[in-house]
Image: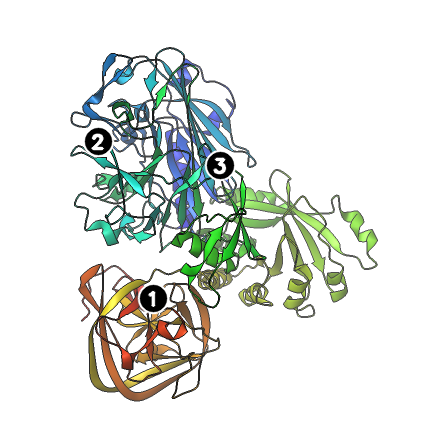
Amino acid sequence: MSNLKLFLSVFAFALGVVSAAAHTAAHNETHDHEAEEEIRFYELRKGDLLVNFTNFGARIVSLIVPDKFGNPADIVLGYDSVDDYKKDDNSFGAIVGRVANRIGGAKFTLDNTDYKLNENDGVNTLNGGKQGFANVIWNVTKFEKSEENPYITFQYNSSNNEQGFPGNLNVTATYILQDKNMLKVNLHAETKDKKTPVNLAQYTYWNLGGHNSSNNILHDQLQVLASNFTELDQYLVPTGRILPVGDTPFDFQTPHVIESRFDKMRDGYEVNYVVDDQNEKKESSVKLAAVLRDGKSGRVLNVWTDQPVVQFYSGDGVNNVRGKGGILYQRNAGVLLVAQGFPNSVNVESFPSQIVSDGKPYKQTTVFQTWRHWPVAKLQNRKMAAVLPSASVLQFTIKGKSGSGKLTDFRLYDNKGTRFQDNHFVVKAMCASSKPQKKQVWIWTEKKEVMTAAAERGWSTFIFDSQRRQLAVEWSSMALLSPLFIEEGGLFDAIALLYPLFIEEGGLFDGDHMKVATFFEISSPEQLEKLQPLDERVENVVVNLLDWQVIPAENIVAAIQGTEKTVFAVSKTSSEAQIFFEALEQGLGGVVLKTEDVEAIFEVKDYLDRRNNEGSVLELTKARVTNIQMVGMGDRVCVDLCSLMRPGEGLLVGSFARGLFLVHSECLESSYISSRPFRVNAGPVHAYVAIPGAKTSYLSELKAGYEVIIVDQNGMQRTAIIGRVKIETRQLILVEAKSDDDNQTSYSILLQNAETVALISSAGVGDQRKAIPVTSLKLGDEVLLRIQGGARHTGIEIEEFIVEK
């Protein structure tokens, strides 16, 4: 589905059920009884985060965020109609309670009184009973749509003996959009009469590839920061025992692809993890509980919570469910990562109490933090500041073994010298900090076809002359746009009086007349030297170089270095845009593409898609060599790059599209030949090689000027230009390998039988041991593979039947 259609479908869905705009008039007011009986839909937006809610179950209906290429998608499961939500057994997106998870035997005893509950899971009570909080209409008491502080509060009064629970309970659920990538959920419950158990939970099923994608969550990488879990009986009710995850399929303390352990779980995962306390104070607020990453889209979800337990459910009960847009959700279409208290605690004396009484309310804070790709952090003086959702700031010092070169040798320590976290996710996030920040593109056009092409590729900021407001209104009715209007003059015209040469400054304003960027037109190097973007109220500066060939792009990059503002240059062609993005390696933060040419949109988007892969992490798999065989003569390809490679780096090459071997460069010295750090002796002419854009090419197709991706032993990738390709007839050797997790599938590669040709292993320490020359390769040696989809058409992965052998 195109981005334009995605947004239109979301709006049509919300408007087709009930107009949320009609509710805005009731801003910050309590609904009367009649309004409480209405099911309504609401929308909040901040930055790239767009969330829709309904008061039926106080649930999240959709959550739209961009991927690493800037393409937005709805990443939560749900339905198109109210009737479907009423029939929903999965509680998609809802607040569940009064007690989430299971209560064994559907009964408990409190203050010497026995209570019998509603049975809706065999003999047990699940998520509050048949008519739990997910299946009632909540009242909306507060609704703030402002960009600065968007939030919504739902409220529900649960009556005494509802579903068998004692006491009248007043419950509120507040969703707050924090920053541009955080959804904070505050849950609160209190009673003024009888004591009662409370364990609320937010029940969103996540698919980071998009709810309508073909991805299931088994291909995602999961990390749960928990070293223990609760033992369950045959009915999935906690017994009270807390067991270690070590040496079990439940161990996700370090990241694992879910599918890699799934074969050990006959019925999938439904496990309650006891979250490790990563903070010095037990009463401190939220802590990181789980991290989910989708390699294809690049999206990352961090779950932060103050709750002691997070449940991981792999969605095995979601099967043949007709969801939003008519999509048929199959098994494992979404994953639950549910923060909560200890399940069945009302019947387990050793578990912390969750009994609420007068003066002792229930509170929970959970934060869902989304990233387009690995978080980018600035490393200065070997320190990194990590900002947690609680707004506390921790300083970390990076320590490592000198010259070891291994990411896993690095550790993070807080300002007291205490080791903070030792896990692969933190290390990779740290190392990805050198990745260039994502470049922004704003569009300046009066052509409808250009607008449509840009909107479908995820660009939503469009610039209009102030007299073209009607065009902005017309286009906004067709696509979700953020129009900006050029207005001359303003509060800072007086700045020109300070300069002997006049710099014309205006501004870009949004539809509410809030200034978004300062705007300069510059026609000489002297004016550029005097450019001082003094307006502290805005984060962006747009510079229109009236003749950029007189003022080289490098000059403007040098002029703005050190400023914290995002600087845009107006570009009239895709080639100009690329020059501004790449000048002095760092480049500008963005361009304003002023064009009436649709092809320019395509070209800039294609360029940025390739560039955005820079510094991202590919998942590599360990495999063991199962066959080594001399096969005779063949035409092999040497690839010489315009970039130097380091130890541990090479190209991904393989005979089969389903799996590519990491072939080491010739950067290491040997007794026979000098180092050639620009070269990879890659393989025979028929072999696949990985190129930017998640594509492959045949080695025989490569030539000077083409691009390939360089990958290191940790999966970090970067793009390089080919300077030369040599094809020569040489003696070849066949190498076959199988991964530890899949003993049925074999992967193969043919390489020149020479001591300078090597595969990369993650097992060694030091430069020489990372590379295993094919002349020294033995059965059982560990090498690195990139496992991917099998079928390819012109280098692009497709879904079709294919057999390679």
Residue at the spot x=44%, y=61% of the render? Answer: 613
Residue at the spot x=60%, y=49% of the render? Answer: 464
* Residue at disc 3, secondary structure: strand
Q: Is residue 690 rendered to the left or right of residue 657?
A: right
Measured Cα–Cα span from mark 3 to mark 1? 41 Å
Mark 1 Cα shell of 10 Å, populated few (<14), some (14-19), many (≥20): some
Q: Which mark is residue 731?
A: none
Number of labels in the image equals 3
Q: Amino acid at mark 1?
A: Ser
Reading the image, the residue beneath label 3 is 177
Residue reaching furthest front?
417
Reading the image, the residue beneath label 1 is 762
* Residue at disc 2, secondary structure: loop
Tell me the mark number nearer the camera, choosing from 2 and 3. Answer: 2
Reading the image, the residue beneath label 2 is 237
Q: Work out whether 718 lies above or below 339.
A: below
